[in-house]
Amino acid sequence: MIASLELLINKVAEGRRIIVYGAGNQGRGIALALRERGIEPSAFIDRNPKIQGCILAGIPVMPPSVIAEPGAADSIFVVVAAFFFEREISALLDSYGFKRLESYIPYSLLKPHDYTVEVSGVCNLRCISCPRGGCHSPERPATMMDLDTFKLVLAKIRREDPFVGNIQLYQWGEPTLNKHLPEMIRHARENAILCAVSSNLNHTTDFRALIEARPEWLRLSASGMEGNYEITHTGGNWETFLANIEIVAKLRKDIYPEMKVELYYHQYKHSIGEQQNKMAEMCNRLDIEFHPVPAYLISLDDVLAYCTGHPLPDSAQRARDLLLVDLDEGLAHARREAALECDAMRVIMINADLSVSTCMMFYYPEGNTVTNNFLSTPLEEIITLRTKATLCKKCKKHAIHRYCGTYAKFSGEESFLLI
Protein backbone atom coordinates (compact mmCIF):
# COMPACT_ATOMS: atom_id res chain seq x y z
CA MET A 1 0.00 0.00 0.00
CA ILE A 2 2.87 2.41 0.83
CA ALA A 3 4.51 1.64 -2.53
CA SER A 4 1.19 2.28 -4.30
CA LEU A 5 0.83 5.67 -2.62
CA GLU A 6 4.37 6.59 -3.59
CA LEU A 7 3.51 5.64 -7.17
CA LEU A 8 0.48 7.95 -7.15
CA ILE A 9 2.48 10.80 -5.64
CA ASN A 10 5.10 10.35 -8.35
CA LYS A 11 2.45 10.39 -11.07
CA VAL A 12 1.07 13.66 -9.73
CA ALA A 13 4.61 15.08 -9.71
CA GLU A 14 4.93 14.06 -13.38
CA GLY A 15 1.92 16.24 -14.13
CA ARG A 16 -0.59 13.46 -14.72
CA ARG A 17 -4.22 13.97 -13.77
CA ILE A 18 -5.55 11.34 -11.36
CA ILE A 19 -8.90 9.92 -12.48
CA VAL A 20 -10.94 7.40 -10.49
CA TYR A 21 -12.77 4.82 -12.64
CA GLY A 22 -16.06 4.27 -10.80
CA ALA A 23 -18.18 6.85 -8.98
CA GLY A 24 -19.98 4.42 -6.70
CA ASN A 25 -19.28 3.75 -3.05
CA GLN A 26 -15.84 2.25 -3.74
CA GLY A 27 -14.83 5.09 -6.04
CA ARG A 28 -15.96 7.79 -3.65
CA GLY A 29 -14.16 6.01 -0.83
CA ILE A 30 -10.96 5.87 -2.89
CA ALA A 31 -11.32 9.57 -3.71
CA LEU A 32 -11.73 10.43 -0.03
CA ALA A 33 -8.69 8.32 0.91
CA LEU A 34 -6.63 10.03 -1.80
CA ARG A 35 -7.66 13.46 -0.57
CA GLU A 36 -6.69 12.49 2.98
CA ARG A 37 -3.19 11.95 1.60
CA GLY A 38 -3.01 15.18 -0.35
CA ILE A 39 -3.83 13.70 -3.77
CA GLU A 40 -6.75 15.46 -5.48
CA PRO A 41 -8.58 13.41 -8.14
CA SER A 42 -9.45 15.53 -11.18
CA ALA A 43 -12.45 13.43 -12.23
CA PHE A 44 -14.47 10.24 -11.93
CA ILE A 45 -15.20 7.97 -14.87
CA ASP A 46 -18.61 6.28 -14.72
CA ARG A 47 -20.83 4.46 -17.20
CA ASN A 48 -24.07 5.86 -15.74
CA PRO A 49 -25.27 8.59 -18.15
CA LYS A 50 -27.42 10.17 -15.43
CA ILE A 51 -24.39 11.29 -13.44
CA GLN A 52 -22.05 12.07 -16.32
CA GLY A 53 -21.45 15.81 -16.31
CA CYS A 54 -22.48 16.05 -12.66
CA ILE A 55 -20.29 16.99 -9.69
CA LEU A 56 -20.02 14.32 -6.97
CA ALA A 57 -18.09 15.03 -3.78
CA GLY A 58 -16.70 18.10 -5.58
CA ILE A 59 -15.37 15.98 -8.46
CA PRO A 60 -16.74 16.02 -12.04
CA VAL A 61 -18.00 12.77 -13.59
CA MET A 62 -16.91 11.91 -17.13
CA PRO A 63 -17.97 9.08 -19.49
CA PRO A 64 -15.69 6.09 -20.18
CA SER A 65 -14.98 7.47 -23.65
CA VAL A 66 -12.36 9.76 -22.07
CA ILE A 67 -9.86 6.90 -22.07
CA ALA A 68 -10.15 6.63 -25.87
CA GLU A 69 -9.11 10.24 -26.46
CA PRO A 70 -5.74 10.76 -28.22
CA GLY A 71 -2.87 10.87 -25.76
CA ALA A 72 -5.03 9.88 -22.78
CA ALA A 73 -2.66 7.09 -21.70
CA ASP A 74 0.19 9.60 -21.53
CA SER A 75 -1.58 12.39 -19.68
CA ILE A 76 -3.81 10.72 -17.07
CA PHE A 77 -3.37 8.04 -14.42
CA VAL A 78 -6.44 5.90 -13.74
CA VAL A 79 -7.27 4.40 -10.38
CA VAL A 80 -9.63 1.49 -10.99
CA ALA A 81 -12.30 1.54 -8.28
CA ALA A 82 -14.64 -1.33 -9.11
CA PHE A 83 -14.71 -4.48 -7.01
CA PHE A 84 -16.30 -7.08 -9.30
CA PHE A 85 -15.24 -5.62 -12.66
CA GLU A 86 -11.62 -4.80 -11.95
CA ARG A 87 -10.38 -7.36 -14.51
CA GLU A 88 -12.69 -6.15 -17.26
CA ILE A 89 -11.84 -2.47 -16.72
CA SER A 90 -8.13 -3.27 -16.61
CA ALA A 91 -8.44 -5.19 -19.90
CA LEU A 92 -10.27 -2.24 -21.44
CA LEU A 93 -7.53 0.15 -20.34
CA ASP A 94 -4.93 -2.22 -21.76
CA SER A 95 -6.71 -2.17 -25.11
CA TYR A 96 -6.41 1.63 -25.27
CA GLY A 97 -2.70 1.69 -24.59
CA PHE A 98 -2.78 2.15 -20.83
CA LYS A 99 -0.11 0.21 -18.97
CA ARG A 100 -0.42 -1.30 -15.51
CA LEU A 101 1.42 0.82 -12.90
CA GLU A 102 2.49 3.24 -15.60
CA SER A 103 -0.88 4.74 -16.52
CA TYR A 104 -3.30 2.86 -14.25
CA ILE A 105 -3.42 0.91 -11.00
CA PRO A 106 -5.91 -1.91 -10.26
CA TYR A 107 -8.24 -1.51 -7.31
CA SER A 108 -6.95 -4.61 -5.49
CA LEU A 109 -3.34 -3.45 -5.65
CA LEU A 110 -4.08 -0.04 -4.14
CA LYS A 111 -6.65 -1.40 -1.70
CA PRO A 112 -6.13 -5.13 -1.04
CA HIS A 113 -8.97 -5.41 1.49
CA ASP A 114 -12.57 -4.30 1.69
CA TYR A 115 -14.53 -4.46 4.92
CA THR A 116 -18.05 -5.51 5.76
CA VAL A 117 -19.18 -4.64 9.28
CA GLU A 118 -22.52 -6.31 9.85
CA VAL A 119 -24.10 -3.99 12.40
CA SER A 120 -27.30 -6.05 12.55
CA GLY A 121 -27.34 -9.82 12.88
CA VAL A 122 -31.12 -9.78 12.52
CA CYS A 123 -33.39 -9.61 9.47
CA ASN A 124 -37.12 -8.95 9.35
CA LEU A 125 -37.70 -11.02 6.17
CA ARG A 126 -37.39 -14.70 5.32
CA CYS A 127 -36.63 -14.59 1.59
CA ILE A 128 -36.67 -18.07 0.10
CA SER A 129 -33.47 -17.52 -1.91
CA CYS A 130 -31.67 -16.65 1.34
CA PRO A 131 -30.76 -19.19 4.05
CA ARG A 132 -32.96 -17.26 6.48
CA GLY A 133 -35.90 -18.61 4.51
CA GLY A 134 -35.16 -22.14 5.65
CA CYS A 135 -32.92 -21.82 8.67
CA HIS A 136 -31.59 -24.81 10.51
CA SER A 137 -29.21 -25.07 13.45
CA PRO A 138 -26.73 -23.70 14.17
CA GLU A 139 -28.19 -20.29 13.39
CA ARG A 140 -26.16 -17.10 13.11
CA PRO A 141 -26.07 -15.05 16.32
CA ALA A 142 -29.02 -12.63 16.48
CA THR A 143 -26.87 -9.76 17.72
CA MET A 144 -26.93 -5.99 17.30
CA MET A 145 -23.57 -4.21 17.36
CA ASP A 146 -23.58 -1.29 19.78
CA LEU A 147 -22.09 2.10 19.00
CA ASP A 148 -19.07 1.81 21.29
CA THR A 149 -18.12 -1.54 19.77
CA PHE A 150 -18.51 -0.11 16.27
CA LYS A 151 -16.13 2.74 17.16
CA LEU A 152 -13.53 0.21 18.35
CA VAL A 153 -13.93 -1.83 15.16
CA LEU A 154 -13.52 1.26 13.00
CA ALA A 155 -10.45 2.40 14.92
CA LYS A 156 -8.79 -0.99 14.42
CA ILE A 157 -9.58 -0.95 10.69
CA ARG A 158 -8.05 2.51 10.30
CA ARG A 159 -5.02 1.52 12.35
CA GLU A 160 -4.29 -1.68 10.44
CA ASP A 161 -5.48 -0.67 6.96
CA PRO A 162 -5.23 3.12 6.74
CA PHE A 163 -6.19 3.43 3.04
CA VAL A 164 -9.73 2.17 3.65
CA GLY A 165 -12.14 4.92 2.59
CA ASN A 166 -15.41 2.98 2.58
CA ILE A 167 -17.07 0.08 4.38
CA GLN A 168 -20.26 -1.91 3.94
CA LEU A 169 -22.65 -2.08 6.91
CA TYR A 170 -24.67 -5.12 5.86
CA GLN A 171 -24.57 -8.67 4.62
CA TRP A 172 -27.11 -11.08 6.15
CA GLY A 173 -29.00 -8.66 8.41
CA GLU A 174 -31.23 -5.59 7.94
CA PRO A 175 -29.10 -2.64 9.15
CA THR A 176 -32.02 -0.25 9.70
CA LEU A 177 -33.09 -2.46 12.61
CA ASN A 178 -30.09 -1.14 14.52
CA LYS A 179 -31.15 2.06 16.29
CA HIS A 180 -27.53 3.28 16.32
CA LEU A 181 -27.13 3.14 12.52
CA PRO A 182 -27.24 6.92 11.90
CA GLU A 183 -24.68 7.54 14.66
CA MET A 184 -22.44 4.83 13.22
CA ILE A 185 -22.55 6.37 9.76
CA ARG A 186 -21.87 9.81 11.16
CA HIS A 187 -18.92 8.57 13.23
CA ALA A 188 -17.45 6.78 10.20
CA ARG A 189 -17.71 9.90 8.04
CA GLU A 190 -16.05 11.96 10.78
CA ASN A 191 -13.18 9.48 10.51
CA ALA A 192 -12.94 9.78 6.70
CA ILE A 193 -14.77 6.52 5.94
CA LEU A 194 -17.90 6.40 3.78
CA CYS A 195 -20.65 3.85 4.40
CA ALA A 196 -22.79 1.68 2.14
CA VAL A 197 -26.16 0.52 3.48
CA SER A 198 -28.65 -1.94 2.03
CA SER A 199 -32.29 -2.16 3.06
CA ASN A 200 -35.41 -4.11 2.14
CA LEU A 201 -37.44 -1.04 3.27
CA ASN A 202 -39.85 -3.20 5.22
CA HIS A 203 -38.98 -1.61 8.53
CA THR A 204 -40.27 1.90 9.19
CA THR A 205 -37.31 3.61 10.77
CA ASP A 206 -36.27 7.25 11.13
CA PHE A 207 -35.23 7.69 7.51
CA ARG A 208 -34.59 11.40 8.04
CA ALA A 209 -31.98 10.66 10.69
CA LEU A 210 -30.47 8.00 8.43
CA ILE A 211 -30.07 10.31 5.43
CA GLU A 212 -28.94 13.26 7.56
CA ALA A 213 -26.06 11.01 8.67
CA ARG A 214 -25.06 10.96 4.96
CA PRO A 215 -24.51 7.35 3.95
CA GLU A 216 -22.73 7.47 0.62
CA TRP A 217 -24.64 4.61 -0.98
CA LEU A 218 -28.07 3.14 -0.27
CA ARG A 219 -29.04 -0.08 -2.01
CA LEU A 220 -32.70 -1.05 -1.94
CA SER A 221 -34.02 -4.46 -2.95
CA ALA A 222 -37.27 -5.76 -4.43
CA SER A 223 -38.52 -8.67 -6.53
CA GLY A 224 -41.86 -7.95 -8.16
CA MET A 225 -44.74 -5.66 -7.31
CA GLU A 226 -47.95 -5.89 -5.31
CA GLY A 227 -48.91 -9.53 -4.64
CA ASN A 228 -45.88 -10.86 -6.52
CA TYR A 229 -43.50 -8.83 -4.38
CA GLU A 230 -44.00 -11.03 -1.32
CA ILE A 231 -43.34 -14.32 -3.13
CA THR A 232 -39.58 -13.95 -2.96
CA HIS A 233 -39.27 -11.01 -0.57
CA THR A 234 -40.94 -13.44 1.78
CA GLY A 235 -42.56 -11.95 4.85
CA GLY A 236 -42.40 -8.47 3.37
CA ASN A 237 -45.24 -6.07 2.67
CA TRP A 238 -45.55 -4.29 -0.67
CA GLU A 239 -47.42 -1.30 0.72
CA THR A 240 -44.76 -0.73 3.38
CA PHE A 241 -42.00 -0.90 0.76
CA LEU A 242 -43.87 1.45 -1.55
CA ALA A 243 -44.47 4.04 1.17
CA ASN A 244 -40.87 3.90 2.39
CA ILE A 245 -39.28 4.22 -1.04
CA GLU A 246 -41.28 7.41 -1.60
CA ILE A 247 -40.08 8.75 1.76
CA VAL A 248 -36.45 7.87 1.01
CA ALA A 249 -36.59 9.50 -2.43
CA LYS A 250 -38.02 12.75 -1.05
CA LEU A 251 -35.59 12.94 1.88
CA ARG A 252 -32.64 12.20 -0.38
CA LYS A 253 -33.70 15.03 -2.70
CA ASP A 254 -34.16 17.45 0.21
CA ILE A 255 -31.17 16.50 2.36
CA TYR A 256 -28.43 14.78 0.38
CA PRO A 257 -29.09 14.59 -3.38
CA GLU A 258 -25.55 13.34 -4.07
CA MET A 259 -26.22 10.11 -2.19
CA LYS A 260 -26.17 7.15 -4.57
CA VAL A 261 -29.49 5.27 -4.33
CA GLU A 262 -30.14 2.19 -6.41
CA LEU A 263 -32.84 -0.44 -6.61
CA TYR A 264 -31.31 -3.88 -6.94
CA TYR A 265 -34.19 -5.62 -8.68
CA HIS A 266 -34.17 -9.41 -8.38
CA GLN A 267 -35.41 -10.93 -11.63
CA TYR A 268 -37.50 -14.08 -11.24
CA LYS A 269 -40.00 -15.66 -13.59
CA HIS A 270 -42.77 -13.82 -11.75
CA SER A 271 -41.03 -10.42 -11.56
CA ILE A 272 -40.05 -9.69 -15.18
CA GLY A 273 -42.08 -8.23 -18.05
CA GLU A 274 -44.66 -5.62 -17.13
CA GLN A 275 -43.76 -5.83 -13.43
CA GLN A 276 -40.17 -4.92 -14.18
CA ASN A 277 -41.17 -2.15 -16.58
CA LYS A 278 -43.41 -0.55 -13.97
CA MET A 279 -40.68 -0.74 -11.34
CA ALA A 280 -38.22 0.87 -13.76
CA GLU A 281 -40.71 3.68 -14.43
CA MET A 282 -41.14 4.26 -10.70
CA CYS A 283 -37.37 4.44 -10.22
CA ASN A 284 -37.06 6.90 -13.07
CA ARG A 285 -39.74 9.10 -11.48
CA LEU A 286 -38.00 8.96 -8.10
CA ASP A 287 -34.51 9.48 -9.59
CA ILE A 288 -33.32 6.11 -8.29
CA GLU A 289 -30.91 3.97 -10.30
CA PHE A 290 -32.54 0.77 -11.50
CA HIS A 291 -30.41 -2.38 -11.68
CA PRO A 292 -32.26 -5.56 -12.70
CA VAL A 293 -30.16 -8.66 -11.96
CA PRO A 294 -31.13 -12.34 -12.35
CA ALA A 295 -31.76 -13.76 -8.90
CA TYR A 296 -29.70 -16.67 -7.60
CA LEU A 297 -29.47 -18.79 -4.47
CA ILE A 298 -27.53 -16.46 -2.24
CA SER A 299 -26.26 -18.91 0.37
CA LEU A 300 -23.19 -20.77 -0.80
CA ASP A 301 -23.83 -23.25 2.03
CA ASP A 302 -26.79 -24.61 0.04
CA VAL A 303 -24.90 -24.44 -3.27
CA LEU A 304 -21.92 -26.35 -1.87
CA ALA A 305 -24.19 -28.98 -0.34
CA TYR A 306 -25.95 -29.35 -3.70
CA CYS A 307 -22.62 -29.83 -5.49
CA THR A 308 -21.74 -32.63 -3.08
CA GLY A 309 -24.95 -34.55 -3.72
CA HIS A 310 -27.34 -33.17 -1.10
CA PRO A 311 -30.85 -31.92 -1.92
CA LEU A 312 -31.66 -28.25 -1.59
CA PRO A 313 -33.76 -27.14 1.39
CA ASP A 314 -37.45 -26.80 0.51
CA SER A 315 -37.31 -23.00 0.53
CA ALA A 316 -34.25 -22.92 -1.73
CA GLN A 317 -35.88 -25.38 -4.12
CA ARG A 318 -38.96 -23.13 -4.34
CA ALA A 319 -36.66 -20.24 -5.20
CA ARG A 320 -34.79 -22.33 -7.76
CA ASP A 321 -38.04 -23.14 -9.56
CA LEU A 322 -38.52 -19.39 -10.09
CA LEU A 323 -34.99 -18.56 -11.29
CA LEU A 324 -34.44 -17.19 -14.79
CA VAL A 325 -30.93 -18.67 -14.81
CA ASP A 326 -31.00 -22.10 -13.22
CA LEU A 327 -28.52 -23.17 -10.57
CA ASP A 328 -26.90 -25.70 -12.91
CA GLU A 329 -26.43 -23.07 -15.60
CA GLY A 330 -24.88 -20.64 -13.12
CA LEU A 331 -22.50 -23.35 -11.91
CA ALA A 332 -21.56 -24.26 -15.48
CA HIS A 333 -20.53 -20.66 -16.14
CA ALA A 334 -18.63 -20.56 -12.84
CA ARG A 335 -16.63 -23.65 -13.81
CA ARG A 336 -15.44 -21.84 -16.94
CA GLU A 337 -13.87 -19.24 -14.63
CA ALA A 338 -12.52 -21.75 -12.12
CA ALA A 339 -8.93 -20.60 -12.62
CA LEU A 340 -9.74 -17.03 -11.59
CA GLU A 341 -9.23 -15.87 -8.03
CA CYS A 342 -11.99 -15.47 -5.47
CA ASP A 343 -13.21 -11.87 -5.14
CA ALA A 344 -14.84 -12.57 -1.77
CA MET A 345 -11.47 -13.36 -0.20
CA ARG A 346 -10.62 -9.67 -0.46
CA VAL A 347 -13.44 -8.86 1.97
CA ILE A 348 -12.94 -8.98 5.73
CA MET A 349 -16.37 -9.89 7.11
CA ILE A 350 -16.85 -8.69 10.71
CA ASN A 351 -20.07 -9.97 12.23
CA ALA A 352 -22.25 -8.20 14.78
CA ASP A 353 -20.87 -10.42 17.55
CA LEU A 354 -17.28 -9.51 16.48
CA SER A 355 -16.54 -12.91 14.98
CA VAL A 356 -14.87 -12.88 11.56
CA SER A 357 -16.15 -15.14 8.79
CA THR A 358 -13.86 -17.00 6.45
CA CYS A 359 -16.21 -16.05 3.61
CA MET A 360 -18.95 -13.44 3.51
CA MET A 361 -21.00 -15.57 1.08
CA PHE A 362 -21.41 -18.51 3.46
CA TYR A 363 -24.14 -18.02 6.02
CA TYR A 364 -23.70 -20.53 8.82
CA PRO A 365 -20.85 -19.94 11.31
CA GLU A 366 -19.85 -23.61 11.66
CA GLY A 367 -16.66 -24.13 9.67
CA ASN A 368 -16.79 -20.50 8.57
CA THR A 369 -15.29 -18.64 11.53
CA VAL A 370 -11.69 -17.40 11.51
CA THR A 371 -11.77 -15.83 14.96
CA ASN A 372 -14.40 -15.08 17.57
CA ASN A 373 -13.05 -11.58 18.24
CA PHE A 374 -11.92 -9.19 15.52
CA LEU A 375 -10.68 -6.68 18.09
CA SER A 376 -8.16 -9.06 19.66
CA THR A 377 -6.94 -10.68 16.43
CA PRO A 378 -4.37 -8.84 14.27
CA LEU A 379 -5.27 -8.42 10.60
CA GLU A 380 -2.21 -10.39 9.47
CA GLU A 381 -3.32 -13.34 11.59
CA ILE A 382 -6.86 -13.16 10.17
CA ILE A 383 -5.50 -13.22 6.62
CA THR A 384 -3.17 -16.15 7.38
CA LEU A 385 -5.96 -18.18 8.96
CA ARG A 386 -8.27 -17.54 6.01
CA THR A 387 -5.70 -18.78 3.49
CA LYS A 388 -5.58 -22.11 5.35
CA ALA A 389 -9.36 -22.54 5.58
CA THR A 390 -10.76 -25.93 4.62
CA LEU A 391 -13.96 -24.21 3.48
CA CYS A 392 -12.11 -22.40 0.70
CA LYS A 393 -10.68 -25.64 -0.65
CA LYS A 394 -14.12 -27.24 -0.76
CA CYS A 395 -15.63 -24.18 -2.42
CA LYS A 396 -12.94 -23.85 -5.12
CA LYS A 397 -13.08 -27.58 -5.88
CA HIS A 398 -16.54 -26.95 -7.39
CA ALA A 399 -15.72 -23.44 -8.76
CA ILE A 400 -18.34 -21.98 -6.41
CA HIS A 401 -15.99 -19.06 -5.72
CA ARG A 402 -16.98 -17.74 -9.18
CA TYR A 403 -20.70 -18.57 -8.91
CA CYS A 404 -22.10 -15.27 -7.60
CA GLY A 405 -20.15 -13.08 -10.00
CA THR A 406 -21.49 -14.91 -13.05
CA TYR A 407 -25.00 -13.61 -12.41
CA ALA A 408 -23.91 -9.98 -12.72
CA LYS A 409 -22.67 -10.87 -16.19
CA PHE A 410 -26.02 -12.49 -17.08
CA SER A 411 -27.59 -9.14 -16.21
CA GLY A 412 -25.58 -7.24 -18.80
CA GLU A 413 -23.97 -5.16 -16.06
CA GLU A 414 -20.67 -5.47 -17.92
CA SER A 415 -22.13 -3.01 -20.45
CA PHE A 416 -20.20 -0.29 -18.55
CA LEU A 417 -17.32 -1.27 -20.83
CA LEU A 418 -19.02 0.23 -23.85
CA ILE A 419 -17.51 3.57 -24.75
Image: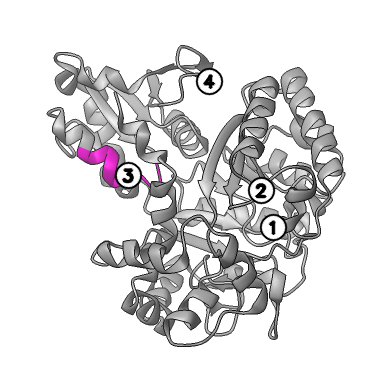
Task: Report crowding for label 3: few under 14, some 14 to 19, many 20 or more residues within 10 A (C-alpha).
Answer: some
Separation (CA) of disc 3 from disc 4: 21 Å
Residue at label 1? 232
- Whether 293 is drawn above or below 302: the answer is above
Residue identifier under label 3: 86
In depth, the one of 165 and 359 nearer the eye is 359
**x 25%, y 27%: residue:** 77
Q: Is any atom of residue 41 visible in this view?
A: no
Q: Magenta stretch: give its range.
A: 82-91
Q: Which mark is residue 56?
A: 4
User: What is the three-letter code of the residue carrying label 1?
Assistant: Thr
Dot 4: what SS?
strand
Estimate how packed mark 1 is, as few (under 14), some (14 to 19) or many (20 or more) residues with alpha carbons within 10 Å. Answer: many
Mark 3 in CB contact with mark 1 (< 8 angstroms)? no
**Three-letter amino acid code of the residue under disc 4:** Leu
The quadrant of the rendering that contains the C terminus is top left
> How busy is the neighbourhood of tag 4: few (under 14 within 10 Å), some, or many (20 plus)?
some
Whole-angstrom CA distance, mark 3 to mark 2, is 28 Å
First in sequence: mark 3 or mark 4?
4
Location of mark 2 (residue): 223
Q: What percent of the width, then of the height, locates residue 357?
A: 54, 72
Q: Are marks 2 and 1 in contact (CB under 8 Å)?
A: yes
Residue 408, which numbered label?
Answer: none
